[in-house]
Image (spheres, rainbow, N blue to C red):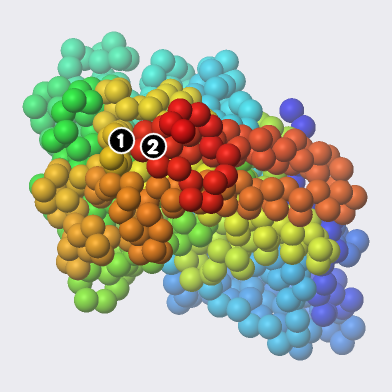
């Protein structure tokens, strides 16, 4: 399959004050010839400068630097030196030379991509001085790719890691690694957390040589490869009768297995595990805890520096919809809070941003701020499972930023989610942020060309959470499409309004769901209402919402104060989350002054109007954007325009029929009560 270069598009004009004098790249590091990362760094610079300026930069080792006449020629220096924080870099200009300094070669590579970004955005100026250090230690992508080549919740083609139960390593893999590393992502899980069939065998001789090849390819770009693990592997590989984490036999089995795996793939970062969740095996079968399960694996992986990332997405997916006391939102918290402090140091709990499942709006997961003695990672999803599946535009970075800035009140300062997962709050080093990836083998990688902004943006905020969503969007536009002002303005408007629009025309006020079961696309208000998944809106003719206050399921009380009291109180709970926390009459007045029902009608009309405006603005770019991406995007935007109407009309009609309350603005709502 053909593939494009996305934002590493070095054909667009960039600028650099000193480019006319730059003739060489000089590497100041011992054994630089053997360091794959330094080689990648040099190659990337050469590629970029030849793409931008048609300049072939020659490579010299430090000993040869003198041979260039320093009066007329200058170089870019890549220098490894002691004393800087891991992965951090300096990029600066002095006397016509550009220097990139770091203490490790990953820092050099990130510095190189920084310089390239500066050139592409016309900021590579005389006297520039940039110092950057990543906020989060682990910046990870989780791919849900299956070995048959399909992708769970994949919206951009098939896997480029797997095909017919084989692992693929090719040119596309290298470009993927370059794109991923260019935004500072340093870890990748290649296979689906639902580990079944051939994927269970990834930790056996059948695949380890190929896993090694892939991990070496990634390593050249500073990316550690991780695998998702099948908790029941000892059984499913036909070697043991059970997988009890406290059984000596099972523990030894894992020790031997880890010895083999790390012997074959010494670069491997570790494993991601989904256990006792949605039918996956886990320690519950043996009446053991998640800590027992995770620690068994952690102990086996520890001698090799392996990390065990254990997911907290654990809930009862066999719920009876009649049961109003059981609350899926509580389950992650209830399952893990009692285990705080019981996990080994090489275990990280991976917690979804919200307590449900990547809805367009959810409160922040109460385990953030709940756990104080456990390594934690934030899991977000850039695959837009519930946010338009990469057919609708939904730029998610503004949402992620809200989550990162959320104050947990676990302590007086440095208590935001961002502080926790950066390791600031509790002094942890095994922590960070993971995103469920949105890539596939489509030529443009992400189905919707503009969905690439989520991949780009995720890496950028995990590295530098203080960047604004808008700055990131601008960078991405500039890097991908060049410096045309009209293009920048229009695409920026689209990106910055997309989440708001999507939230407006889909499920209202934080209630979520209302999608077609199983494939999760398109409106179906009652799609999940009478199901076993624990995802209800409880609408009747008087009102809607789930009572999660102290009188209801008590979920609101899982937060620290003042969050708990705010969420618990209908009057103080933010409008955006009101139906998540409370069952509310349609006639209830929101803080905006509107009733709930009028808010529903208004936002649904507004959401569609924003999309219409977005599409109009987009269509003015005909002839300004390259034809192929323009046509690809146009198709999706026209679909979004129509589909947003479908959402609006189904939601509005549903609530009109339920409540019998007409729209006070008299707009067209279909059916029922007159
Ligand atoms: O809600 C679910 C998704 C599943 C996914 C699961 C998870 C990988 O619909 O497809 O399984 O979340 O996060 O484990």
Between the C-alphas of marks 1 and 2, the distance is: 8 Å
Label 1 Cα crowd, 10 Å radius (few <14 / some 14-19 / many 20+)? some
Relative to 32, say whether 352 is above or below: above
Let me know if residue 172 appears in the view.
no
Query: Percent from the top left, x then y, of residue 542?
Result: 28, 40
Relative to 524, say whether 644 is above or below: below
Pointer 1 and pointer 2: residues touching (CB < 8 Å)?
yes
Q: Which residue is mark 2?
A: 660
User: Along the line of sight, which residue is nearer the eye, 293 or 33?
Assistant: 293
Quadrant for residue 654, please give it: top left
Label 1 CB, ligand 1: below 8 Å? Answer: no
Q: Which mark is residue 541?
A: 1
Query: Percent from the top left, x then y, of residue 469?
Result: 56, 64
The residue that appears at 43% across and 37% down in the rendered structure is 656
Relative to 66, say whether 163 is above or below: above
Left or right relative to 138: residue 160: right
Let me know if residue 195 appears in the view.
yes
User: Along the line of sight, which residue is nearer the eye, 51 or 410?
Assistant: 410
Helix, strand or loop at label 1? It is: loop
The residue that appears at 81% across and 63% down in the rendered structure is 486
Q: Hey, which residue is sitting farthest front in the picture?
A: 674
Q: Earlier in the sequence, mark 1 or mark 2?
A: 1
The residue that appears at 19% across and 57% down in the rendered structure is 568
Left or right relative to 626: residue 276: left
Tell me the quadrant of the picture where the N terminus can be found: top right
């Amino acid at each position: 399959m053909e593939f494009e270069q996305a934002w590493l598009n070095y054909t667009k004009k960039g600028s650099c004050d000193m480019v006319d004098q730059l003739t060489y790249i000089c590497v100041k590091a011992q054994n630089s010839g053997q360091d794959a990362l330094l080689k990648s760094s040099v190659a990337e610079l050469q590629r970029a400068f030849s793409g931008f300026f048609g300049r072939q930069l020659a490579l010299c080792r430090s000993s040869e630097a003198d041979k260039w006449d320093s009066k007329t020629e200058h170089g870019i220096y890549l220098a490894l030196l002691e004393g800087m924080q891991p992965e951090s870099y300096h990029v600066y200009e002095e006397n016509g030379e550009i220097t990139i300094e770091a203490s490790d070669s990953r820092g050099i590579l990130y510095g190189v991509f920084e310089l390239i970004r500066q050139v592409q955005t016309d900021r590579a100026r005389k006297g520039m001085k940039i110092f950057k250090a990543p906020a989060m230690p682990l910046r990870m992508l989780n791919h849900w790719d299956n070995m048959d080549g399909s992708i769970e919740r994949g919206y951009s083609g098939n896997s480029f890691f797997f095909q017919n139960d084989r692992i693929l390593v090719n040119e596309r893999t290298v470009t993927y690694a370059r794109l991923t590393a260019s935004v500072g992502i340093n870890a990748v899980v290649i296979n689906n957390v639902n580990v079944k069939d051939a994927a269970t065998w990834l930790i056996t001789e059948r695949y380890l040589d190929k896993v090694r090849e892939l991990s070496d390819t990634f390593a050249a770009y500073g990316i550690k490869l991780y695998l998702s693990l099948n908790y029941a592997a000892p059984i499913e590989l036909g070697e043991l009768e059970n997988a009890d984490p406290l059984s000596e036999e099972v523990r030894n089995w894992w020790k031997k297995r880890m010895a083999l795996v790390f012997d074959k793939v010494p670069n491997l970062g570790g494993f991601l595990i989904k256990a006792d969740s949605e039918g996956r095996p886990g320690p519950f079968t043996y009446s053991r805890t998640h800590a027992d399960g995770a620690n068994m694996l952690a102990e086996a992986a520890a001698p090799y520096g392996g990390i065990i990332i254990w997911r907290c997405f654990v809930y009862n997916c066999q719920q009876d919809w009649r049961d109003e006391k059981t609350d899926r939102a509580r389950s992650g918290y209830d399952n893990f809070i009692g285990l705080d402090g019981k996990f080994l140091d090489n275990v990280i709990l991976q917690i979804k941003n919200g307590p449900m499942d990547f809805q367009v709006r959810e409160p922040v997961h109460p385990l953030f701020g709940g756990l104080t003695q456990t390594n934690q990672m934030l899991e977000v999803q850039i695959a837009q499972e519930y946010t338009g599946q990469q057919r609708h535009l939904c730029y998610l970075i503004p949402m992620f930023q809200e989550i990162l800035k959320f104050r947990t009140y676990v302590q007086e300062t440095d208590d935001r989610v961002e502080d926790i997962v950066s390791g600031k709050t509790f002094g942890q080093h095994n922590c960070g942020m993971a995103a469920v990836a949105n890539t596939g083998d489509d030529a443009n990688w992400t189905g919707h060309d503009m969905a690439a902004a989520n991949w780009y943006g995720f890496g950028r905020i995990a590295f530098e959470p203080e960047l604004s969503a808008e700055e990131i969007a601008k960078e991405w536009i500039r890097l991908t499409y060049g410096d045309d002002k009209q293009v920048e303005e229009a695409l920026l408007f689209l990106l910055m309004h997309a989440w708001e629009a999507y939230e407006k025309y889909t499920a209202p006020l934080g209630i979520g769901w209302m999608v077609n079961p199983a494939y999760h696309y398109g409106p179906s208000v009652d799609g999940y209402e009478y199901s076993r998944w624990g995802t209800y809106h409880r609408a009747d003719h008087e009102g809607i919402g789930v009572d999660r206050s102290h009188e209801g399921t008590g979920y609101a009380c899982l937060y620290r104060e003042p969050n708990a009291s705010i969420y618990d109180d209908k009057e103080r709970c933010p409008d955006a989350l009101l139906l998540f926390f409370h069952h509310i009459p349609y006639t209830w007045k929101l803080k905006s002054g509107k009733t709930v029902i009028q808010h529903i009608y208004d936002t649904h009309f507004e959401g569609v109007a924003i999309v219409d405006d977005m599409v109009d603005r987009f269509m003015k770019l005909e002839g300004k954007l390259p034809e192929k991406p323009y046509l690809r995007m146009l198709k999706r935007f026209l679909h979004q325009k129509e589909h947003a109407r479908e959402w609006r009309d189904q939601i509005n009609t549903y609530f009109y029929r339920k409540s019998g309350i007409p729209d006070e603005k008299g707009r067209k709502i279909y059916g029922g009560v007159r």
